[in-house]
Amino acid sequence: MRGHEPLIAMRRRGVRPRFARFDLDAVPAWRDWSTWPEWSDAALVEVQPSDAIARLDLRCAVGMPAVVMGGSDERAAALFAALLQAGASRVLAFTDERSVDSLEGHAWPA
């Protein structure tokens, strides 16, 4: 996982972006998203293919909305569940693999 260090540093200073985007595909923007505040208020974290979703430290997402982008349905669903379990306030997931036929069980928390 890359790009989470600036998010952790921001959270420790009491600053929170509007949401965090967790990308399952390679995105070079994770390197410098924290220098974008004047035009973007979202954190960008890259989850690498070699990362085991169950072992990720997702405390940086506690109490904030998260968006999962890309990857296979299986990895996106695993990250979706892991972010909810870690305490993200809301989670949305979009995959590259196929469209979803049913949203049952994949709703924002009340």
Image (spheres, rainbow, N blue to C red):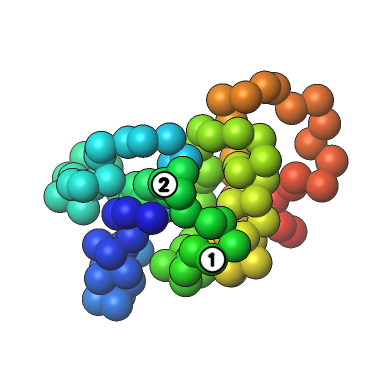
Q: Is residue 86 above or below residue 92?
A: below
Q: Is residue 96 left or right of residue 42?
A: right
Q: Say whether residue 21 is visible.
A: no
Please name the amino acid that badge 1 sits on: Arg
- Residue where numbered disc 1 is placed: 55
Residue at disc 2, secondary structure: loop
Q: Is residue 45 left or right of residue 52?
A: left
Q: Say whether residue 91 is visible.
A: yes
Q: Is residue 52 above or below residue 70?
A: below
Q: Is residue 82 above or below residue 26?
A: below
Please name the amino acid that badge 2 sits on: Gln
Residue 108, image x and y in percent?
Answer: 69, 50
The residue lying at 21 percent from left, 47 percent from top is: 31
How crowded is the residue under tag 2: few (<14 C-alpha within 10 Å), some, or many (20+)? some
- Residue where numbered disc 2 is placed: 48
Residue 30, image x and y in percent?
Answer: 27, 46
